[in-house]
Amino acid sequence: MRELVVLGTASQVPTRARNHNGYLLLWDGEGILFDPGEGTQRQMIHAGVAATKVTRICLTHVHGDHCYGLPGVLSRLALDRVEHPVHLHYPASGEEVVRALVAVSTPGIDLRLVPHGAAGEIAPGLAVEPLRHRIGTFGYRLAEPDGRTIVRERLAAAGIRGPDVARLQREGRLGGVRIEDVSVPRRGQRFAFVMDTAPCEGAVALAEGADLLVTECTFSDDDAALADQYLHLTAGQAGSIAGAAGARNLVLTHFSSRYPETAQLEGQARRRAGNAVVRAAADLDRIGFPRRRGAWMGEGDRDGDG
């Protein structure tokens, strides 16, 4: 299962309807928690997701609304006696803050600190790019390896059925039939997480071809001067990143408390987002990945979503 659970959508100041940041990505067997702000542990209860699902925690930077929920989450993992390792990824420039937050957490879990200071892969399939904010900030990108999609008509024509299908996929060849003969290329799914930043090359690089792009949308286009002052994105700039990168779906979040409603922000982003489907997130939303292109489809259908 691949799903994004939105735990909070506020920026610096929470509101009655918006908790501070928090995003749990359920990706096959992993639970990757991004930017846990205050109240994240409680929001997980409201969302119906167990803290025991968390296998990695990824901090974009160490401003409080993106990391002050860390001690509570770690303490809950200790209380629940989580036995699997938990990797904590964060910018090396935030080392002092991260160690202070970890120090006040309840001990008892296998926590592995993994600082990073440059663009590149930091774990299998997980990479970072620097963003442009007031302190050291990195966005994250999770990419599944490319594979192949089986075409049923080609399997039938080759006379392959039952357990032999799995054997062909595993070994790449069965008799005179190659996996390439009965399948088409399939691009792996991609997820991108772009938080506090002004427009920059790193944001577009992270978003390139993303099936699901989550990005901050702190200000309206009408408040572009404030966005420029504080090195944040406007709604239109968030949309432009998605459009330039060819993202399929754009999820907006990290809203300033000056905007009680998000419809205007969503509209501003949509006008500049190209073909991306645009959605303004709300607390406790559960957002599934778009259906994979061409998975187990017929010859005539494989160019559509399936």
Image: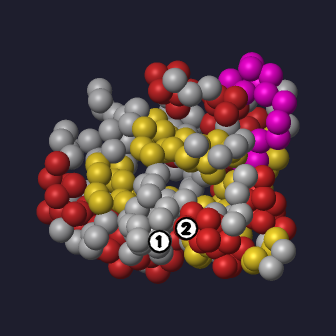
CB of mark 1 within 8 Å of CB of mark 2?
A: yes
Q: Position of residue 4 (x, y in %)?
A: 49, 44
Give the mark, 1 or 2, whose residue is nearer the N terminus. 2
Viewport quadrant of the C terminus: bottom left
**Image-quadrant location for residue 271:** bottom left
Residue tagged 1: 299
Name the residue: 27% across, 73% down.
274
Amino acid type, residue under disc 2 in the picture: Glu
Viewer-nearest residue: 16 or 141? 141
Query: Is 103 placed above or below 178 here?
Result: above
With 12 as the anchor, is 97 left or right in this view? right
Name the residue: 45% across, 46% down.
288
Calculate the distance from the C-alpha at mark 1 to the C-alpha at mark 2.
7 Å
Q: Secondary structure at mark 2?
A: helix
Viewer-nearest residue: 185 or 55? 185
Residue tagged 2: 153
Name the residue: 47% across, 80% down.
201
Q: Position of residue 254 (x, y in %)?
A: 37, 49
Does 78 appear in magenta? yes
Viewport quadrant of the N terminus: top right
Q: Around disc 2, counting alpha carbons within 10 Å, would you say few (fewer than 14), some (14 to 19), or many (20 or more)?
A: some
With 107 as the anchor, is 32 left or right in this view? left
Query: Is 143 placed above or below 119 here?
Result: above
Is residue 65 visible in this depiction of the protein? Answer: no
Is residue 89 visible in this depiction of the protein? Answer: yes
**Image-quadrant location for residue 296:** bottom right
* Residue range corresponding to the magenta coloring: 75-88
